[in-house]
């Protein structure tokens, strides 16, 4: 960003107080903010007591070698014991931990007692394959219970896992196996997506032909789809059902140091070469457990929780596996896509299981908006009581749609800002405390310190814009980038002395609440003004004909950058634009709409209706690729795209704009 702070263009006046009954029984009240502000470390020490420690820590934070943190360093615990065994010991063995819903409609309910037996067996199998504490295990799986079981089995043995999205290519998998120096890969023959079996094992076979993957000695394969023509390398490949099923279902967990590595997770690669983010044990589990309890107001006896993220993304790690299970929650795990076999599948699942807490991403909400209000209206969604959002800034209109059409105009929405690096939620409303504002993550959670600074690291006043920073260490923070301490220092700690640089633009409103404005790399410079892609996108999405928008700044001789927008139109409007005249009329209408919402400075120079936008597997728009298109460059790395053919379609539309 240049020397001028982000312009504060969007005004959003709508406010939604917490429902009175939720507030009256909330797990966490406003007192938590005060307590944490008075004694931040004491607050976290108290939260650590949510867990069962074999050795209770006496130290909270060791920051003597900043920014390399140690939390609860003299404590010892086992993560899998905390997520599974202790609930069984507490008499909750019959509670369902996972309601699994396969895409083809097969279901399984797994209780905590069964989960304990399954995790124990899987742990013994890994031991038989030679896995020892400290060995890295790569997990490349569909969204099935064995994925969670595999993660917990690794955690139980102190073997850090590295989960790689099942949608990534053999090359992406090989790079990650190589970087983490994994010894075992856990995979499946395939999984179900979009109505058909989609193979996974061939990508593992191919990845293991790449240099740097020689240390992988075993591939453990779950049979999910039963495809018959699966290649097999004797001595290396082992069926899960053959080795796991015959093991003992009792395993005594060993306690590990609080700073023992729990997992490595490569960031999704929205901005460049993936970074192996390292998370450790005690601090991580403390914060995911606390935030899951506080932000969703989880009542484990009665709630049915569902996070729609893929487990290959950090949200799946923290809010499918570790947060909910450490809290003894009952949750839904769904294998497939939201529109298979019909566009109401998610809402059918909510109705079927009586889901009370739903956690999803703006990209999914915008897709549902595009499909139409009538689809969720066909289902009984009255069980829902808290809705969550994560992954991108949520456009105010998408937020309103979520509240109205999914939340019956009553359910609080928690917009949670955090990153792979932060490990757990950092900014979010609390559903029983906060008066929410559509599109704002609002404020740091209790025990978290965040603010917005300008280029000189000065905190901006209310109404100002700049960079989001975290000003104090937090328990679930990344400890380093795997094998690259220098990159850790350079990426996060060198921009502002003593502060963690998140890489996101943000502004403070007049109440001091924080609004995320997109990645700093995406901020546009137009005629001397820094303009947020998020705000222009939100203005476009507030037009009734637009379902989704992606905005980039393309080099421009007059204005430094010119705003270039790619829009997906809602059902009816999309058909209209195939007629060229109607199309250009709509483009003018949209330009005028943005100008009226945000001012003439934010009016896009070009608007291009497209059928799809390039997204990562976690659903984020990859603006850098759109910038490449808008500036007529060759495309950068596309390996983390969900579907790289999307870019061909967009480029094919472009001659008129080039
Ligand atoms: P990479 O770092 O490789 O580019 P990534 O940043 O997409 O990948 P994640 O760690 O999954 O990988 O995403 C974190 C980012 O997602 C945040 O830095 C922010 O840009 C965005 N984000 C997540 N939640 C929110 C939210 N509630 N509001 C606004 N932005 C969000
Ligand atoms: Mg990032």
Image (tube, grey):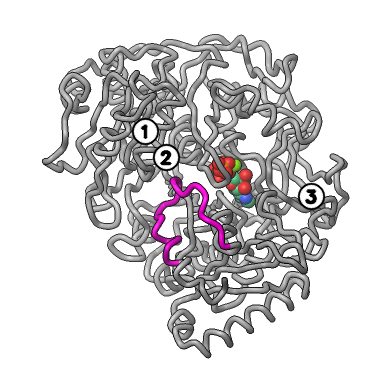
Residue closer to the observer: 295 or 161: 161
Q: Quadrant of residue 124?
A: top left
Q: Which quadrant is the C terminus positioned in? A: bottom right
Whether residue 351 is in magenta: the answer is no
Mark 2 or mark 3, earlier in chain: 2
Above or below 275: residue 397: below
Above or below 600: residue 97: above
At label 3, counting other C-alpha atoms closer than 10 Å, the crowd grade (few under 14, some 14-19, many 20 or more) is many
Q: Residue 466's mark? A: 3
Which element carries disc 3, helix, strand or loop? strand
Q: Residue 311's mark? A: 2
Above or below 350: residue 149: above
Question: Which residue corresponds to mark 1?
Answer: 148
Residue closer to the observer: 377 or 567: 567
What x and y, as percent, mark residue 35?
76, 32
**Distance between the alpha carbons at the discs numbered 2 and 3:** 32 Å
Residue closer to the observer: 616 or 538: 616
At label 2, counting other C-alpha atoms closer than 10 Å, the crowd grade (few under 14, some 14-19, many 20 or more) is many
Which residues are drawn in magenta?
Answer: 632-649
Q: Residue 590's mark? A: none
Mark 2 or mark 1, earlier in chain: 1
**Distance between the alpha carbons at the discs numbered 2 and 1:** 8 Å
Above or below 544: residue 420: above
């Amino acid at each position: 960003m240049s020397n001028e702070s982000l312009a504060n263009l969007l005004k959003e006046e709508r406010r939604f107080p917490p429902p009175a009954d939720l507030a009256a029984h909330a797990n966490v009240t406003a007192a938590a903010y005060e307590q944490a502000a008075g004694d931040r470390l004491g607050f976290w020490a108290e939260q650590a007591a949510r867990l069962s420690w074999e050795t209770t820590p006496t130290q909270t934070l060791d920051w003597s070698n900043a920014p390399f943190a140690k939390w609860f360093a003299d404590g010892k615990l086992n993560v899998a014991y905390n997520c599974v065994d202790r609930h069984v010991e507490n008499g909750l063995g019959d509670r369902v931990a996972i309601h699994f819903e396969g895409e083809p409609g097969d279901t399984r309910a797994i209780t905590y007692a069964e989960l304990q037996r399954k995790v124990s067996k899987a742990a013994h199998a890994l031991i038989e394959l030679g896995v020892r504490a400290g060995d890295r295990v790569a997990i490349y799986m569909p969204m099935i219970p064995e994925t969670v079981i595999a993660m917990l089995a690794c955690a139980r043995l102190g073997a850090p896992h590295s989960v790689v999205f099942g949608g990534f290519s053999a090359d992406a998998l090989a790079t990650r196996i190589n970087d983490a120096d994994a010894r075992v890969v856990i995979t499946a023959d395939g999984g179900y997506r979009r109505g058909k079996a989609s193979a996974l094992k061939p990508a593992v076979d191919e990845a293991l032909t790449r240099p740097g993957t020689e240390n992988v000695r075993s591939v453990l394969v779950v049979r999910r789809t039963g495809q018959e023509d699966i290649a097999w390398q004797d001595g290396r490949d082992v069926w899960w059902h053959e080795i796991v099923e015959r093991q003992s279902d009792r395993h005594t967990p060993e306690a590990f140091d609080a700073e023992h590595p729990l997992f490595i997770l490569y960031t999704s690669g929205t901005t460049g070469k993936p970074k192996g983010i390292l998370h450790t044990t005690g601090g991580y589990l403390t914060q995911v457990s606390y935030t899951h309890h506080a932000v969703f107001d989880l009542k484990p006896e009665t709630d049915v929780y569902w996070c729609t993220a893929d487990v290959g993304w950090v949200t799946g790690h923290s809010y499918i596996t570790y947060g909910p299970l450490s809290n003894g929650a009952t949750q839904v795990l769904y294998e497939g896509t939201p529109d298979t076999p019909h566009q109401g599948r998610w809402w059918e699942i909510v109705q079927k299981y009586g889901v009370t807490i739903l956690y999803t991403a703006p990209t999914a909400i915008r897709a549902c908006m595009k499909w139409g209000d009538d689809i969720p209206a066909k289902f009984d969604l009255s069980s829902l009581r808290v809705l969550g959002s994560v992954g991108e800034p949520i456009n105010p209109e998408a937020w309103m749609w979520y509240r109205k059409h999914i939340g019956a105009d009553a359910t609080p929405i928690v917009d949670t800002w955090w990153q792979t690096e932060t490990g757990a939620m950092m900014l979010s409303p609390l559903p029983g405390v906060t008066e929410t504002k559509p599109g704002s993550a609002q404020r740091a959670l209790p025990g978290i310190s965040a603010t917005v600074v300008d280029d000189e690291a000065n905190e901006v006043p209310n109404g100002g814009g700049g960079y989001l920073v975290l000003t104090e260490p937090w328990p679930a923070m990344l400890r380093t980038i795997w094998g690259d301490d220098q990159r850790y220092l350079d990426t996060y700690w060198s921009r502002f002395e003593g502060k963690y640089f998140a890489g996101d633009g943000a502004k403070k409103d007049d109440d001091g609440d924080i609004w995320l404005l997109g990645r700093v790399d995406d901020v546009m410079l137009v005629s001397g003004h820094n303009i947020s892609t998020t705000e222009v996108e939100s203005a476009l999405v507030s037009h009734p004909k637009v379902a989704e928008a992606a905005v980039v700044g393309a080099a421009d001789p007059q204005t430094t950058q010119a705003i270039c927008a790619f829009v997906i139109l809602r059902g009816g409007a999309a058909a209209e634009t195939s007629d060229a005249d109607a199309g250009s009329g709509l483009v003018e209408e949209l330009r005028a709409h943005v100008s009226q919402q945000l001012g003439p400075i934010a009016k896009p120079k070009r608007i291009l209706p497209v059928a799809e936008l390039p997204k990562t597997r976690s659903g984020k728009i990859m603006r850098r690729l759109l910038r490449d298109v808008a500036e007529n460059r060759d495309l950068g790395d596309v390996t983390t795209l969900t579907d790289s053919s999307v870019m061909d379609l967009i480029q094919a539309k472009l001659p008129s704009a080039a």
